[in-house]
Amino acid sequence: VRARGTKAGRKALWAGGYRSGPGKALAKISISHPFDRRLAAQDLAGSLAHARGLHRAGLLSRKDLAAIEAGLADIGGEIAEGSFRFEDTDEDVHMNVERRLSALSGEAGGRIHAGRSRNDQVALDLRLWTMAAIDRARVAIDALSLALVERAEDWLEKGIVVAARTHLRAAQPILLSHALLAYVEMLRRDTDRLADCRRRAAISPLGSGACAGTTLPIDRSAVAESLGLPAITENSLDAVSDRDFAAEFAFAAALAMVHLSRLAEDLILWTGEEFRVLRLPESATTGSSMMPQKKNPDSLELVRGKTGRAAGSLVSLLTTLKGLPLSYNRDLQETQEPLFAAADTLELSLAAMTEVVTGLTPRPARERAEIDAAALSTDVAEELVRRGAPFREAHGRVARWIRRAAQENTDFREVAAADEPKLATFLRRLTPETSVRARDLPGGTAPERVRERIRELRKVLRPARSAR
Ligand code: ARG
């Protein structure tokens, strides 16, 4: 019995003591090269570092090392150009690479797995892969942040004031730029979280073997250093079964997706007929096959929709990990696809969001809904406080003016001025624009505060900043 699609008579590299091959279903459930081939570049880098470590330990001749180096380079080329043949007998990327290495570099290839197991090997590969995914995600997060900052800068100059909302009801006037920058703050935390996660991923498990280390005198720190990793794991049992970095990444990705989903939701609202604040670029919409007038915000809806998947990846990872006894268990193979999915979803969604944000345009003032005067009522209450009233009393007075204005169908500022003539000048000058300017505290929406934050953000968001 052998797995379908395998070469006749060929046995798995681990099957030295086996008389038969795996059952049909086992072969099928076991095979991972269709997805773990995404780890090929990391597997080659790890193999190279390990081979050099064996050489330094006196376990691999210079000649054999040279043959291995050449073989690994050839395999890298074959994989890059798509000519590498993954075989099902060699269930995963690690065995496919080792098999090919032996074919290319003869006996030397048979020496590479000394002091190593696929368990510490895959742990390393996943760490390196996660680090690269983090670097890509951080670049993409910065690109979106910059797109938001650029719009914020433009709309600040245009002085676009809209109603801030709580409970989705108009609350107080703000600069539209201030709302965009709220999302940039979320993205700043996301990139920070990813950098933090990267720190814990950048630790080498090589030398942990299958679970209990190796008798061979490998200098683990030197191997780690040659991979650019600043540290080595402290416990071999933990090292082969630790996927915390994957779970942390999935969480950071899921939370970043939650932020993108909220931005998507806001942009769907702000560009809609009821809010009439912004316009979507046509390239971010699709039409209806039935209703000729429609331009639907599909990019945004899909980003919002994909957030479910990202959360699913995190739940999937945590669930796979929760019941595992020490140390390596094959369940761990199931952590790969959710990790890849989390990274793919985030990356694609960031690109889609950046495309949308870059094309956003404000609607002309005549199309935008006017800000209801009632949104200025907190400013009036605070003016009464400045004049000595207890806030609770001021709140009550303004509330009664608002109520009367609604009954009499007038502007509450008129009702207030009639009832309290001393406020007349203040009330006459009170507009959404003056209200925005007056909320001049750090973190506030006053134009000078927003301008200052844009300046700071521009400094940290240099265009196309390379990952650290
Ligand atoms: N493909 C495996 C994984 O991803 C590699 C490790 C296999 N180890 C083993 N003892 N079967 O987990």
Image: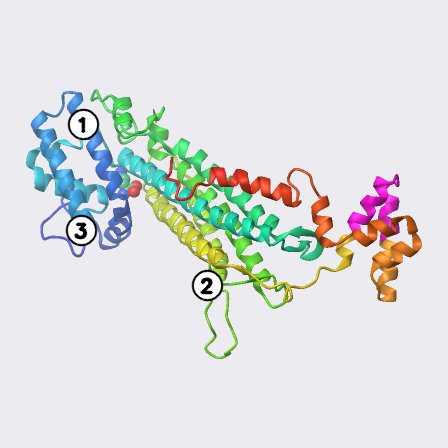
Quadrant of residue 329 within the rendered picture: top left
Quadrant of residue 201 within the rendered picture: top left
Q: Secondary structure at mark 2?
A: helix
Segment tinted magenta in the rendering: 377-398
Asked if residue 276 can be seen in this view, the reply is yes
Residue 433: in magenta span: no
The numbered mark at residue 52 is 1
- Percent of width and height locating residue 399: 85, 53
Say which residue appears at 63% left-offset and 67% top-offset: 367
Tell me which label, 3 or 1, sits earlier in the chain: 1
Mark 3 residue type: Glu
Circles 3, 1 touching at the beta carbon (< 8 Å): no
Tell me which label, 1 or 2, sits earlier in the chain: 1
Question: Who is closer to the viewer here, 355 or 175?
Answer: 175
Measured in 3D between alpha carbons, the distance from the residue under mark 3 to the one under mark 2, in whole angstroms, is 34 Å
Q: Which residue lies under the disc numbered 2?
A: 284
Mark 1 residue type: Arg
Looking at the image, residue 434 sits to the left or right of residue 366; the answer is right
Question: Who is closer to the viewer here, 382 or 171?
Answer: 382
Crowd around label 2: few <14 · some 14–19 · many ≥20 (10 Å): some
Say which residue appears at 48% left-offset and 54% top-offset: 307
Measured in 3D between alpha carbons, the distance from the residue under mark 1 to the one under mark 2, in whole angstroms, is 50 Å
